[in-house]
Image (tube, rainbow, N blue to C red):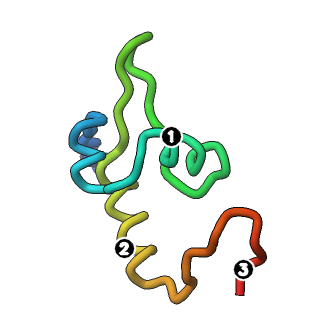
């Protein structure tokens, strides 16, 4: 007998994401395009979601990061 070791993926909608990440929609979109935030999953032409585990990993990485945010266009310290 073969055991299925895959884990179920939990998806969160935009409202849940914005409750977790207090950033503007556009900021999140721009971060996704730059590769700085987990990519959204397109469910339908009008509905997107994010993988909860990926978002939680992003949050943990931000907590562990010593890099400080800087103004756009300025070099990082």
Which one is in front, 36 or 69?
69
- The answer to whether residue 8 shows anywhere in this view is no
In this image, 49 relative to 15: left or right? right
**For marks 2 and 3 on the same chain, the one whose residue lies earlier in the sequence:** 2
Q: Name the residue under label 1.
A: 26
**For marks 2 and 1 on the same chain, the one whose residue lies earlier in the sequence:** 1
Q: What element carries label 3?
A: loop
Neighbor class of circle 3 (other Cα within 10 Å; few <14, some 14-19, many 20+) is few
Neighbor class of circle 1 (other Cα within 10 Å; few <14, some 14-19, many 20+) is few
Residue 59 vertical placement versus 67 (above, below): above
User: Which disc, if any, is residue 55?
Assistant: none
Marks 2 and 3, how far apart at CA: 21 Å
The residue under the point 27% across, 38% down is 11
Residue 32 vertical placement versus 36 (above, below): above
Quarter of the picture containing the N terminus is top left
Dividing the picture into quarters, in which one does residue 21 lie?
Answer: bottom left
User: Which disc, if any, is residue 60?
Assistant: 2
Q: Mark 3 points at which residue?
A: 76
Neighbor class of circle 2 (other Cα within 10 Å; few <14, some 14-19, many 20+) is few
């Amino acid at each position: 007998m073969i055991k299925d070791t895959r884990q179920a993926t939990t998806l969160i909608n935009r409202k849940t994401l914005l409750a977790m990440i207090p950033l503007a929609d556009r900021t999140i979109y721009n971060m996704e395009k730059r590769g700085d935030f987990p990519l959204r999953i397109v469910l339908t032409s009008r509905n997107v979601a994010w993988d909860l585990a990926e978002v939680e990993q992003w949050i943990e990485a931000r907590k562990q990061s010593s890099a400080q945010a800087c103004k756009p266009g300025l070099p990082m310290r």
